[in-house]
Amino acid sequence: MPDHLASFGPFRVDWISWAPTLGNGILKTLEFTFASFVGAVVAGLLLALMRESSVPPVRWLARIYTEIFKNLPLLTEIFLVYFGLASLGLRLSVFEAGCASLIVFYAAYLSEIFRGGLQGIAAGQREAAHALGLSEREVLTRVVVPQAVRLVLPATTTMLVDMLKSTSLLITISAAELMTVGQLIASTTFRAMEVYFVIGVVYFAMCYPLSMVSLWLERRLKAGTPLSPRRRHLIAQVRLAMPAGAAGGLR
Amino acid sequence: MNVGKAEPHVAPDHSDPAGPPVVVRVEKLVKRFGDTRVLDGIDLAIRRGEVVSLMGQSGGGKTTLLRCINLLEEPTAGTVEVGGEVVSQDGESLHRASRVQLRQRVGMVFQSFNLFQHLTAAENVALPLLRVGKVDRADAVRRAVDLLARVGLADKALELPARLSGGQQQRVAIARALALRPVALLFDEPTSALDPESSQEVLSVMRELSTEGITMLVSTHEVGFALDASDQIVFIDRGKVAHAGAPRDVVFGSASERAREFFAGFVRYGNGNG
């Protein structure tokens, strides 16, 4: 361990040599988060649509699923998927098991959020779209989904941040993510306070910008600011076609 | 029981075979919700350029009648024709593509405006042009702003609905309903959710449209508007046409007791407003 680092304030761990290990841990955490989030959004959407189904058993199935997995601790779900299924002969890799348990858990929560979003759109919005002669598909893609996305975005990004933090529970199955790496460094250097402090800072550095981005997005959506270049272009065209001197409206 | 049958539904000049073509024709229309007959044999004919006011107590079936014309509700029985084409007959209505086509030819204005909340006024008007009318973007934008100008709101083109007053929202909704140049406009109590001032602002736009020859079927409680802007009032009572005819006849001298009761307040006190 180089001496000049050993004397840097209260920091005694040689972080430069640990950097690659730490970096791998960060990457792994992001991989788990990304893969599980995509999976949970898809599954959550599916469950939300099932909850709105006209076929009662389909609704019940989704309801039962949601209630079960919302009310089990995530750690229990991780153990069930990784150790439980293995004992039944279904041996998943750590990555598969980690993602599967995160997806199963967060899909339940996201489905509730998405269901709220779908229900939050007044029936009149769909009717107006139908009355204009939009096809079923256009009603969904042009009117329902854009508004539902605006409604569910804040809660969904909160879930994303929560999920990123929850990947730390995967330490229990040695998932090689950030927390597992932290434990490895701590047990090698015997500097628990310093190591877990740094690990905490890294988690914070990943989560805080995500929260900020979601707040920023939320504010822009609320103000109606166009996010897609197509819409921005259309609005610019409208401004050109408007009478000169008209003030106000979207920037 | 069948009061409607005993009286002429259509004023004499409207039955003139040489007049403008009938744009919307409804015959023996029945709509049941469960055991309730909301519409019980409605007959109605609207010629091109005509303004017809649908009046009657709330819950009498006016809204359902309008919704059966653009198939937001499925008629249970009877015939609905739009522009000479049968859209519903004996409980069989147009499906999918042809239903979508029908709706492009009939504009609708709702009581609660129903502007798309995530889009600006101009985008609300441009949406049907872009999606349904297959108009290119530059053209759609120009037409949307022109339509907004027609309802006096060109300067609000980039406002979101939430930032517009009720009257302004309803005028945007009218512009949106006009976008696809429909053969007829259906108004479902367009001013019921508005304060008197906003109502006047919307009614004056509607008056202007009527002078431009737009065919309109208007469910309304605005007796003043019905009297001086419409060619015909159809008074609906418990799912039947109780009286249809020239506005003054229906308001001031209806043979239908229900209609007389309905208009009594107006005849006594309200003359001349609106």
Image (tube, coloured by chain):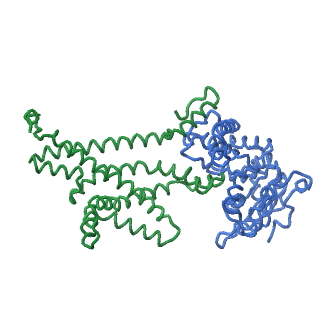
Chain colours: A green, B blue
Residue B208 sits in quarter: top right
Position of the N terminus of chain B, as image quadrant, is bottom right
**Toward the viewer: B112 or A144?**
A144
Looking at the rendered structure, the number of numbered marks drawn on it comes to 0
Can you give x and y, in whole percent of width and height, for residue B14 in the image?
88, 54
Q: Could you say where residue A180 lies in the image, as x and y percent from the top left?
A: 20, 53
Of residues B247 and A31, the one nearer the viewer is A31
Horizontal and vertical percent position of residue B252: 83, 53
Q: Nearer the viewer, residue A165 or B231?
A: A165
Q: Is residue A246 left or right of residue B221?
A: left
Locate the C terminus of chain B by quadrant.
top right
Above or below, comparing residue A220 to residue B220 in the picture: above
Residue depicted at x 10% and y 46%: A191
Q: Tell whether A150 sits left or right of B90.
A: left
Q: Position of residue A62 (x, y in %)?
A: 43, 67
The quarter of the picture where residue B99 lies is: bottom right
Say which residue appears at 32% left-offset and 58% top-offset. A99
Asked if residue B32 lies left or right of residue B267, the reply is: left
Asked whether B247 or B214 is in front, the reply is B214
Q: Residue furthest top?
A: A245
Q: Is residue B141 above or below residue A83?
A: above
